[in-house]
Image (cartoon, helix red, strand yellow):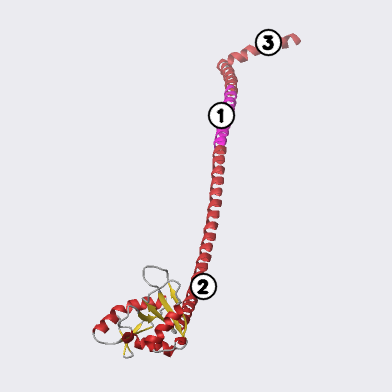
């Protein structure tokens, strides 16, 4: 039985393969193809990994380069921001200076206005004081007369000389003259004699008689005027001359011209 069984099994194998020869070959080929595809897939997978690594490296390099560029730009921006900040600070300082300068200008303008006000006050006060001094000087000189052209001698006694003239020409006592002296610098012409009367009525008497009494003399008598009065009298001179030529008797008083106590308009 054993022998029969072995003999029976041996031919069964070849007979089975011989029944479907094409199917066996196809399965073999399919299995071989699958094996080849797997090998190719593994190769492709290995190539994809290499390419991916290269891509990653390239991407990282590009990113690093971009990062470097961004970092460089950021540095420039930070530098620009510093410059802008410094410019802003400079502008703020300039603005503060301008505000301070404007404040200083306002302060100076206020001080200037105060000074103008002070100067105006001082000017007004000076003008008032000048008028007072002028008034006092005019009052003091209202006792005086000037004798112009009286011959001058060396070592003369001027007071006695003028007292002699008062006594001889105007019939007034010599002691009506309180003082007499010459004024001005010595020169070719006799200096003026300024004499001071004790009483103004005596002075007025001399003024009233001077034209008649001194018409044949080489000297004359006039008011002892202040500098301001002298300037005003010179200004009134043309008017005085015109009125004299018209046969009138003008009088000069304190810068004004009168005819019969009526003030005349100056030429």
Q: Main secondary structure of the magenta part?
A: helix
Q: Position of residue 259 (x, y in %)?
A: 31, 88
Q: Position of residue 7 (x, y in %)?
A: 70, 9
Which residue sits furthest left?
246
Q: Secondary structure at mark 1?
A: helix
Q: Is residue 61 magenta?
A: yes
Q: Residues within 10 Å of mark 2 (few under 14, many from 20)?
A: few
Q: Secondary structure at mark 2?
A: helix
Q: Is residue 267 visible?
A: no
Left/right placement of residue 111 relative to residue 252 reads right
In space, the residues marked 1 and 2 are separated at their CA atoms by 87 Å
Q: Which stretch appears magenta?
A: 43-69
Cβ atoms at labels 2 and 3 below 8 Å apart? no
| Residue on which the image places disc 2 | 118
Mark toward the start of the polypeptide (2 vs 3): 3
Q: Residues within 10 Å of mark 3 (few under 14, many from 20)?
A: few
């Amino acid at each position: 039985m054993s022998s029969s069984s072995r003999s029976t099994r041996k031919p069964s194998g070849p007979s089975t393969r011989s029944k479907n020869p094409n199917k066996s070959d196809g399965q073999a080929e399919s299995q071989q193809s699958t094996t080849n595809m797997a090998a190719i897939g593994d190769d492709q997978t290995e190539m994809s990994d290499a390419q991916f690594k290269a891509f990653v490296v390239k991407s990282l390099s590009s990113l690093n380069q971009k990062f470097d560029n961004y970092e460089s730009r950021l540095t420039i921006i930070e530098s620009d921001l510093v410059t802008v900040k410094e410019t802003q600070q400079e502008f703020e300082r300039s603005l503060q200076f301008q505000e301070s300068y404007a404040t200083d200008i306002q302060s100076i303008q206020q001080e200037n206005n105060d000074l103008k006000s002070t100067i105006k006050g001082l000017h007004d006060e000076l003008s008032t004081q000048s008028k007072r001094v002028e008034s006092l000087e005019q009052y003091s000189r209202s006792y005086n007369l000037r004798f112009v052209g009286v011959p001058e001698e060396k070592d003369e006694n001027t007071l006695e000389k003028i007292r002699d003239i008062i006594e001889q020409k105007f019939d007034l006592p010599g002691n009506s003259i309180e003082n007499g002296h010459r004024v001005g610098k010595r020169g070719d012409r006799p200096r003026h004699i300024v004499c001071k009367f004790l009483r103004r009525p005596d002075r007025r008497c001399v003024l009233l008689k001077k034209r008649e009494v001194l018409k044949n003399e080489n000297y004359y008598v006039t008011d002892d005027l202040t500098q301001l009065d002298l300037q005003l009298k010179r200004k009134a001179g043309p008017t005085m001359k015109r009125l004299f030529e018209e046969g009138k008797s003008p009088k000069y008083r304190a810068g004004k011209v009168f005819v019969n106590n009526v003030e005349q308009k100056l030429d």
